[in-house]
Image (cartoon, rainbow, N blue to C red):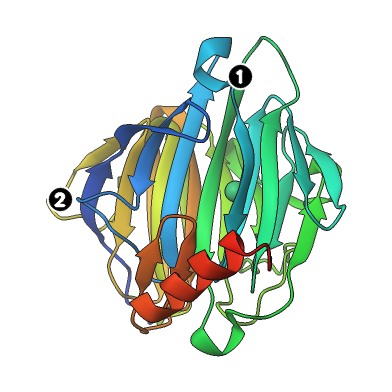
Amino acid sequence: MHNSEPLPGSHPREISRVVRGLPATDGAGVELTRVIGQPALPMVDPFLLLDAFRSDRPGDYIAGFPPHPHRGFETVTYLLAGRMRHRDNAGHEGVIEPGGVQWMTAGRGIVHSEMPEQEEGLLEGFQLWVNLPAAHKMDAPAYQEFPADSIPTEQHDGGTVVRVIAGETAAGTRGPVVQPLTDPLYLDVELGPDGAFVEPLPSAHRGFVYVIDGELSADDANPPGMVMRRDDLGVLSLGDSVSLHAGANGARFLLIAGRPLNEPVARGGPFVMNTQREIREAQADYAAGRF
Ligand code: MN
């Protein structure tokens, strides 16, 4: 049952590339999968990094991310399982729980820790880095934090569930996170067996899908008929809609898109600016305790 007819007059996006993440270790020894921000996929403008973590072995996550700085972009943590405690040098503190999101604008600089609030059990989730335009990299830090019960959910026929974290769907559901600088769409979509999902997407946005579970195909894919599975990231070509369908066991995936900044990107670990000179300034400011 693929009732995924293209939207009238639309130019559907293809899955132009499928990328697998690389095993990586970050923080004080957290084992994770780096999907965006690795040699095969340095970025999907405005997205600088996507880490996926999923482990029920405490040794993979218990060391957490002790205090570290950020400048020049936003970090977005979305948890599916487990709990993470967040604390920063401005006295802000909280716990992210399953289904909850923390959208942190680091702006000119913050020093924070992100530590598992559990000693055993499954920890699963994602961290996405969203770039800020040059004119806003030195803005004051800010938070948008929402627990699972304040993230609106759409239910469609056939078992489709859409959690809207940011952006707006065709049905008019609006996510609680607001960021006009990149106008992000961040959806967590579950499809039932053979379920279909068709959504318009702003034509200038860049985006991708990341398969959490099951099998997912794009109605327009290169090569045709290509199937994405758990932990595959599919880069979307340009177009104004996306049309996907699940395999016989359903699928769950993230659909993330945003307006590209088309600016130079200079990276220095936890700092992402426009020039190497700005990276050196960030390092000097951090070393001097000016964050
Ligand atoms: Mn961090």
Which residue in the protein does label 2 denote? 224
Quick check: 32 above or below 102?
Answer: above
Query: Along the horizontal axis of the image, is 212 left or right of 177?
Result: left
Three-letter amino acid code at disc 2? Pro
Query: Are the residues at dot 1 and dot 2 in contact (C-beta closer than 8 Å)?
Result: no
Point out the tag, 1 or 2, that comes first from the N-terminus. 1
Query: Which callout, 1 or 2, points to the residue nearer the camera?
Result: 1
Query: Along the horizontal axis of the image, is 70 left or right of 220?
Result: right
Which residue in the protein does label 1 denote? 62
Q: Position of residue 95 (x, y in %)?
A: 81, 37
Out of 21 and 217, give the one closest to the viewer: 21
The verdict on label 2 being within 8 Å of ligand 1 is no
Quarter of the rendering containing residue 8: bottom left
Q: Which part of the image, by quadrant, shows the C terminus? A: bottom right
| Labels in figure, total | 2
Quick check: 90 above or below 61?
Answer: below
Quarter of the rendering containing residue 47: bottom left
Residue density around tag 2, few if under 14, some if 14–19, many if 20 or more, within 10 Å: few
Residue at 39%, 80% in the rendered image: 277
Is residue 2 among what the camera can see?
A: no
Which residue, as the protein is rendered here, is positioned at the far left?
223
Three-letter amino acid code at disc 1? Ile
Out of 73 and 157, give the one closest to the viewer: 73
Residue at 65%, 67% in the rendered image: 109
Q: Which part of the image, by quadrant, shows the N terminus? A: top left
Quick check: 248 above or below 130?
Answer: above
Element under disc 2: loop
Q: Position of residue 26 (x, y in %)?
A: 45, 35
Element under disc 1: loop
Q: Position of residue 56 (x, y in %)?
A: 56, 12
